[in-house]
Image (cartoon, rainbow, N blue to C red):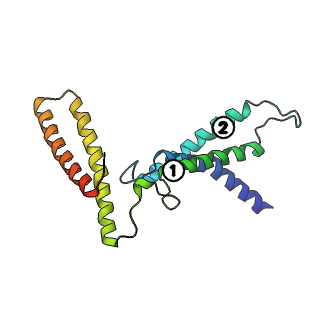
Amino acid sequence: MIVVDLLRIVAAFVLILFLPGFFLVMALFPKKNELSEEDDWLYRMVLAVVLSIVISIILAFIIGQFGVNEDTGMGYFTPLYIVPSLLGICVVLLVIGVVRGAYPFIYTPRSERVITSLPEEKRKGLKDKMERFRELELEVKKLKANLENELSYKAKKRFKKELGEKEEELNGLSKELKIKD
C-alpha cells in the first residue's frame, strides 16, 4: 500500500508541477533553440515548473468558485475534479503544440516537410536552403525595422546596403526553391 501511495504522490507532483507548464511552453515555443542557443532545455524546464504552478493556482481559483457540493457537503476542490481538469488542459496544450510543430515525431506541418523521396545529400541541401531562407526572412524584417528608427545618415546607408544584399540573396533562394509570394 505504501508503494501505491508513493506512486500517487509522485504522479500528483508531476501533474501539478510539470506537465501543464511543459505542454504550454512547447505550444508557445515549438522550435528548438527558440528560447536560447545554449541552454534551451534549461529555460524550458524552469518555465514548465513556473507555468505549471500558475496554471494550477488559476485552476484552483476556478474550481473553488463552484461553492459547496450539496451531496457531500464538501467543496469541489478534490482530486476527483482537479485531475481531469489538469489532464484536459494538458491534452488541449498538447494538441496546440502538435499543430504548431513542437512534436515532429507526431506531426510535421506542411511548411516544415522535406521530400523524403530525394537522395540524402539533396534532402539535406534542400533543408539547409530552407533554413537559410527562413533566417534571411527574419534578418530582412529586422533590417526593415531598424530603417524605420531614427538613425544617422551613415547608419541608414549601411542598413540599406545590407538590406539590399539580404533581399538579393533571399530572392535568389526563393527562385531556387521555387517559392511564390
Residue 115 can be seen, yes or no: yes
In this rendering, the answer to whether 80 lies above or below 128 is above
Residue found at the far bottom of this picture: 119
- Residue at the spot of label 1: 99
**Secondary structure of residue under mark 1:** helix
Locate residue 49, reporting x and y percent. Answer: 55, 47
Which residue occupies 23% across, 34% down? 146
Q: Who is closer to the viewer here, 165 or 5?
A: 165
Quadrant containing the C terminus is top left
Q: Which mark is residue 56?
A: none
Q: Who is closer to the viewer here, 179 or 18?
A: 179
Quadrant containing the N terminus is bottom right
Residue count near mark 2 (Cα–Cα under 10 Å), binned few <14, some 14–19, many ≥20:
some
- Residue at the spot of label 2: 59
Residue count near mark 1 (Cα–Cα under 10 Å), binned few <14, some 14–19, many ≥20:
some
Which residue occupies 34% across, 67% down? 123
